Image (cartoon, rainbow, N blue to C red):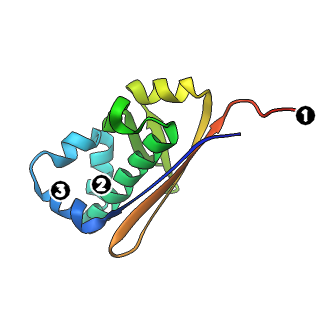
Amino acid sequence: MVLGIGCDIIEIKRIEKAIEKDGFLQKYFTNNEIELINIRGKNNAETAAGNFCAKEAVAKALGCGFGNVAVKDIEVLRNNKGEPYILLHGNGRTEFDRLLGSKILISISHSRETAMAFAVIEGGRANVL
């Protein structure tokens, strides 16, 4: 059963400029995410933008946005195949549990100018007729 959906889109140039500022990555990303972004080398702005969109999409899918959930409560990582996955911490985990969520599906994509992400939260019990 789908409990929540969310999507977000951002211009990669905005994130590229933000990365140049001291402390941007540390403010919005966990140490594991920063490591992932830095590993990506020249594409780090694309990875950072995609991850930032994923965080926004998940916050929207949770139904609370970043009012109750901190940006770092949503961690966007990659498995050994390069597929993105979400780890929730703090209020992010609390909101997910409140929804009776069991799984978060995330998709991230980008063009040369923009990055976008789409999140679906699954869980709960389906109504039986």
Q: Position of residue 3 (x, y in %)?
A: 62, 38
Find the distance from the CA under tag 2 to the CA under tag 3: 11 Å
Quick check: 121 left or right of 45?
right
Q: Is residue 4 above or below residue 69?
A: below
Q: Position of residue 121 (x, y in %)?
A: 59, 41
Q: Position of residue 60 (x, y in %)?
A: 46, 43
Q: Mark 1: which secondary structure?
A: loop
Q: Is residue 1 above or below residue 113?
A: above
Residue drawn at the location 9% of the way across and 49% of the way down: 22
User: Between tags 1 and 3, which lies in front?
Assistant: 1
Q: Is residue 111 above or below residue 65?
A: below
- The label on residue 68 is none
Instruction: Identify the amino acid type marked 3.
Output: Ile
Mark 2: few/some/many CA within 10 Å (<14, 14-19, 20+): many
- The label on residue 37 is 2
Q: Which residue is mark 3?
A: 19
- The label on residue 129 is 1
Instruction: Identify the amino acid type marked 2.
Output: Ile
Q: Mark 3: which secondary structure?
A: helix
Instruction: Identify the amino acid type marked 1.
Output: Leu
Q: Residue furthest bottom?
A: 112
